Amino acid sequence: MMKRKEYFKVVLILPGNVLVTIPLLLFLFTRNSYSYNLVSPHNLLFYIAMFFLALGLFLAIWSVRTFYNKGGDGTPGPWRPVSNLIISGPYRYVRNPMILGVVDLILFESALFTSIILLLWAIVFFAGNIIYFKIIEEKELIKRFGADYENYKKNVPMLFPKFTPYNNK
């Protein structure tokens, strides 16, 4: 039960802020300078938005479930990292599927509201995570999991999925 509460907190804090709080603040502070229009279902952009919504939810849910089932102790939050190196589910195709899911969800918001500001937020979030992964997270993972992570890192791309799953056998 405690593990579920921890995961619920992580989902509220991390994606909640990235997908709700920050976009809402961006809207409030830029609504007089930039337009926000809900795209019509008669517009191709609506279907592009729905594609990003479906892909983002799929990746985010699959990633969190895999983390929950295979990660051992800990959560996806950096303040309480998992105890097992996860190389299953979406992590067989890409090292950071959770971030890709969240970026897709920000792109959904951007397309749905035809918002350049939210598109810029998606780019900043994506770039910021690349920097964080390279400077902090990868070094921590190498310390914690050693050669297993080095081998995984060598065979699985950081952010752009490969089509064949990694087999660590």
Image (spheres, helix red, strand yellow):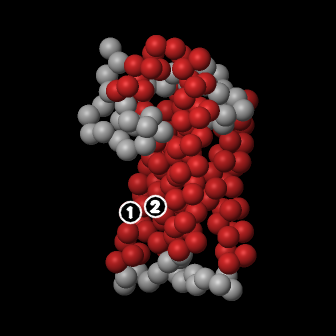
Residue 129, given in percent of the width and then of the height, sits at 56, 45
Which residue is outermost to the left?
164
Residue in the image at 55% along x and 37% along y: 133
| Residue type at numbered disc 2 | Leu
Q: Establish if 142 lies above or below 165.
A: above
**Residue 85 vs residue 159: left or right?**
right
Q: Nearer the viewer, residue 48 or 143?
A: 143
Whether residue 94 appears in this view of the structure is yes
**Which residue position holds label 1?**
51
Q: Secondary structure at mark 1?
A: helix
Q: Are marks 2 and 1 in contact (CB under 8 Å)?
A: yes
Q: Amino acid at mark 1?
A: Phe
Which quadrant of the rendered structure holds the N terminus?
A: top right
Between marks 2 and 1, how big is the CA–CA gap? 5 Å
The residue wearing badge 2 is 53
Determine the residue positioned at 48% across, 39% down: 96
**Which of the 4 image quadrants contains residue 19?**
bottom right
Q: Is residue 20 above or below residue 134?
A: below
